[in-house]
Amino acid sequence: MTITSHDVARLAGVSQATVSRALRDDHRVSAATREKVRRAAQALNYVPSEAGRTLSTRSTRRIGVIVTDLTNPFYPHVVAPLHDELQALGYRMMLITERSDEAVAGENLLDQSLDGVVLATATTESRLPAQLDRRGVPYVFLNRDTGQPGDYASVVDNEGGGRLVAGVLAELGHRRIAGIFGSPNTTTGRDRELGFRLALAEAGIGLPDSRVVRGAFEYDTGYEALPRLLAADEPPTAVFCGNDVVAIGVLNAAITAGLRVPDDLTVIGFDDLPMADWEVFRLTTVRHDLRELARQAARLLVRRITGEADPAGERLILPTEFVPRATHARLT
Amino acid sequence: MTITSHDVARLAGVSQATVSRALRDDHRVSAATREKVRRAAQALNYVPSEAGRTLSTRSTRRIGVIVTDLTNPFYPHVVAPLHDELQALGYRMMLITERSDEAVAGENLLDQSLDGVVLATATTESRLPAQLDRRGVPYVFLNRDTGQPGDYASVVDNEGGGRLVAGVLAELGHRRIAGIFGSPNTTTGRDRELGFRLALAEAGIGLPDSRVVRGAFEYDTGYEALPRLLAADEPPTAVFCGNDVVAIGVLNAAITAGLRVPDDLTVIGFDDLPMADWEVFRLTTVRHDLRELARQAARLLVRRITGEADPAGERLILPTEFVPRATHARLT
DNA sequence: CAGATCAATGCATACGTATTCCAAACGCGT
DNA sequence: ACGCGTTTGGAATACGTATGCATTGATCTG
């Protein structure tokens, strides 16, 4: 039923070895036979079996990308450029969406079916990296890393971004400031909070626990946090959100709460997703180059696979930029 | 470097064949040896090579899912349940995002590396289905199909949904009605338009070309269409959009145009994405069960793979339901 | 107790490709 | 005509797993 290189060989009147060579442009086959084989392959509609090739070459040209939840708008915006860049580098992408570390590890990543892995879901507790290391599977962190030296990672200057926002809020005269940060077991959560706190402290502004919420980088986190923050004795005049998705949750919750943004409340996000620029939001946020973040990760991973990467690890850090839109205002 | 079943066999003191059988719970191996092999495999951290297994069994337990653009919010909401259902059925998902049919076909789908394919991008001109047929690769259409009998497809009652909206708009007193439909070479575009038109006609309401736009199911389509529709001599009082993403583009454009929704303009979507319920939108739309749409497609594909499906094709059609929210109003 | 039945395991091979090693053929200079 | 290098292609094998078939030893049956 399925056509193999042997069938092509028979039709072309050559050996299977020659077929393999001809189709891979091996210089040891003459132009004439190459053409003959080409035509035979064409006629039979031959497509090399990838399993056979994998077994023989021990490489799959396939890369796994692990994300938690695709319906979180952040991930598609990183997966898409990742796909394109990997494709350009001659690899195919295998998307794996899993909640739990364990499920991922289970025979998925370690069965030699992937040449490498992009981890976009790392937490500081994740055991997955160690498993990959043990098995010799090359991997890179994307966006989040473990913060350990020796990592291969493409990340954003989270601390710098957090500082940026703190500076702006201080300058705008805000003093009762709240933060809805990501989980402290992610570097994106931790470092954005860190930078934000440090810069606030330098400006002499406190950040009491009553005005701090931490949670997953999801819509609901922002949506559910705002009412809680507003219920405090001294409700905040500004909220820094761990990312845009959380900020958008806050903006929607603000409507329910009857708050006007930015008159009653300043809201700042992080990432600058395309959505942030929609008229309904016009979200003031911190921009970094998501596309480049993904591209860098792809290139780094391929370098690691081919052995060109620095054996001591490489951490590529992208700069951040403040993007003023319509959800921040000077305190009057 | 990598551990094979031979290594396990040596350690357990049995043959490679017995290892294979023991780990696959073959009843022809005694409980004692099974346990012995298990322990050896555990000790060596053995994971079966998927390439070897594929070559031997001629099955990959892997299914390709083809979408055009993940950053379009519609797709993540269908890909996520698809992933989960396929996983539950014992298959893994390979996500393929491609603009062009040709790029997809190129050695990606036909190299025996996939047991089946889910097509979420079909157009009526697509040549991909024919190629898959020729190679004997089982596939199903998801959401869009070709409309041909003999298809295996999980779709929505698009015509019915279109009718539903036309009925509501007519009842609300709207007469100058516009439509921003999907591409006519997609069944989702074509059939929603068809149902809408038919029901409008039955209500004695015309739909002149000046109030019709067709385009991709994207944000920009809605965003760019609205100004054009408004520039007409008799601008519409209501717009039916091909899907929610388009409708959201329209809602944002309405803000730019200074229109109040629904006072100045009624806007209706299709799909009922979670986003439609956000406070900033409160989009009136047509609901269908996206999760079930994906699940059905997964199950149908697996049935087709295992040969249990009706050889004459199967088209599973999900019902639609009108969801009134805050973007429609009676014409005063 | 001989012969038949059955459970448990090993042997050998298939799957499809890439590649190493070899052999043949050819060209060319002498 | 011979030797030598070069080009071209074939034979054989490796990759790792699954499985049909053969083999062994044990248990059962009459």
Image (tube, coloured by chain):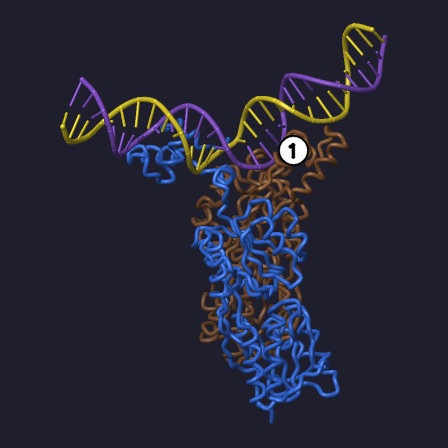
Chain colours: A blue, B brown, C yellow, D purple
Quadrant of residue A262 in the image?
Answer: bottom right
Quadrant of residue B309 in the image?
Answer: top right
* Residue located farthest toward the bottom when viewing the structure as drawn: A332
Q: Does the rendering let one see residue B163?
A: no
Q: Is residue B234 above or below residue B144?
A: below
Looking at the rendered structure, the kind of residue marked 1 is Ala
Q: Nearer the viewer, residue A332 or B308?
A: A332
Where residue A275 appears, as percent x and y from the top left, is 54, 71
Where residue A280 appears, as percent x and y from the top left, is 57, 77
- Label 1: state its secondary structure: helix
Report crowding for label 1: few under 14, some 14 to 19, many 20 or more residues within 10 A (C-alpha): many
Residue displayed at 65% across by 74% down: A181
- Say which residue label 1 marks: B9
Quadrant of residue B32 in the image?
Answer: top right
Q: Is residue A175 above or below residue A282?
A: below
Residue displayed at 75% across by 87% down: A233
The quarter of the rendered structure image containing the N terminus of chain B is top right
Residue displayed at 62% across by 89% down: A204
Q: Is residue B239 above or below residue A312?
A: below
Q: Does the rendering let one see residue A219?
A: yes
Where residue A245 appears, as percent x and y from the top left, is 60, 71
